[in-house]
Image: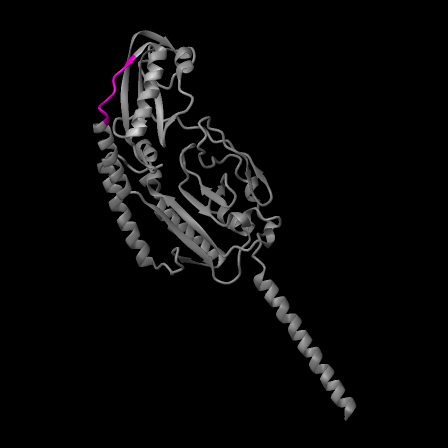
Amino acid sequence: MSSSLTMGLAMLGGGTLAALIAWNAWTTRRNTPRQPEHDTVPLGDSVSTVPVEQLANEDGRVDPVFSDSALVHAVATPERRPGLDALIDVIAPISLEGPVSGDAALAAMPSTRRTGSKPFAIEALNERSGHWEMPQAGQRYTAFQAGVQLANRSGPLNEIEYSEFVMKAQAFADSVGGMPDFPEMRHEVARARELDQFASGHDAQLSLTLRARQTAWSPGYVQQHASRLGFVAGVVPGRLVLPAEHPGSPPVLVLTFDTQAALAEDPTQAALRDLTLTVDVPQVARTDQPFARMRDAATALGQSMDGILTDDRGQVIRDETLDAIGADLETLYDTLDARDLAAGSAQARRLFS
């Protein structure tokens, strides 16, 4: 009797232990982030000919990009700096008594190209071509114009910034022997406020969040699935971009996830529960269909990665809601077009920056 009882207890204990081991194995497997497949080309090996997102650097340089397993060092072709535009800039003509060399103009340029939070620029009228351009060595110029942007996402041009603009432009004009003609400050500041009011009421940055239904994702797993849709590594850890067709243009879409996970010592153990897809509406041309492409990308990633689409509060987003957003977006595009600030245009990209 005692022997039978001992054997029964032993069998029961063995069964319990086996069940515990199985449960622990299942829990570990469930909590381990999904890993990328090994037979797929790593993200870093596939982007050497693809332009990455534009940097703020004025020399067009693109910094190295680190991914889970590779160093991506791609150089985007810098886009020509958009010229001054009376629609969004204060412009002060600078007349000359005679031609000035490009070397003299470059030597007279101010050390910074901002007045407060607004971009500042000097353009020169090329004696030979008759075109306005940034001053260049070896050229001769018959006139200059100084400009400062009326508004951007930091707000409208104010009186202090306008005064700084006048000081910088006057100093440049004195150095090249020119005579500036400044527009009236109160008029330009009022124009800046009106433009800023319009921009503030018609700015839009849309985002969709994709959340894991059950098992979390590793950064490599996200990169692998995103790369199949054309995303490449951005310049910031945890950021992937869908490049625009034209080099130097802002990305059509941006995909972001936790930066700390991207920088983890062992990225395979970093668990991601969500990622965000974003489109900066005024920065991307309407013809690129950024919202439709964001919606398609979110759907494709949700299906391949077992994710669910939500807003930033965790509420599930239905197709009817996305349809309504798309309709509102078309109205916004029409309004921007009517103001000569079409989404993706040089003027819109400068104003909404």
115 in the magenta segment = no
- Give the left or right position of residue 161, taking residue 244 as reference: left
Q: Residue at x 47, y 31 (%)?
A: 76
**Range covered by the magenta-colored residues:** 179-185
Display colour scheme: one colour
Q: Is residue 277 above or below residue 314?
A: above
- Residue 231 seen anywhere in this rendered image of the structure: no
Residue drawn where x is 59% and y is 66% of the image? 27
Q: Position of residue 316 (x, y in %)?
A: 38, 61
Vertical relation: 297 (above or below) 169: below
Quadrant location, the N terminus: bottom right
Q: Nearer the viewer, residue 141 or 322?
A: 141
Q: In this image, 43 relative to 17: left or right? A: left
Q: Residue pushed farthest bottom?
A: 1
Q: Where 140 falls versus 89 (above or below)?
A: above
**Total marks drawn?**
0
Residue at the extreme right of the image, as rendered: 3
Quarter where residue 100 is shown: top left
The answer to whether residue 155 is seen in the rendering is yes
Q: Position of residue 192 (x, y in %)?
A: 25, 33
Q: Quadrant of the C terminus?
A: top left
Which residue: 25% across, 26% down? 86
Front residue of 124 and 119: 119
Image location of residue 37, percent across then percent down: 58, 52
Classify 176 as above or below 24: above
Q: Is residue 335 left or right of residue 255?
A: left
- Image coordinates for residue 308, horizontal then vertical, percent: 43, 59
Q: Is residue 139 left or right of residue 331?
A: right
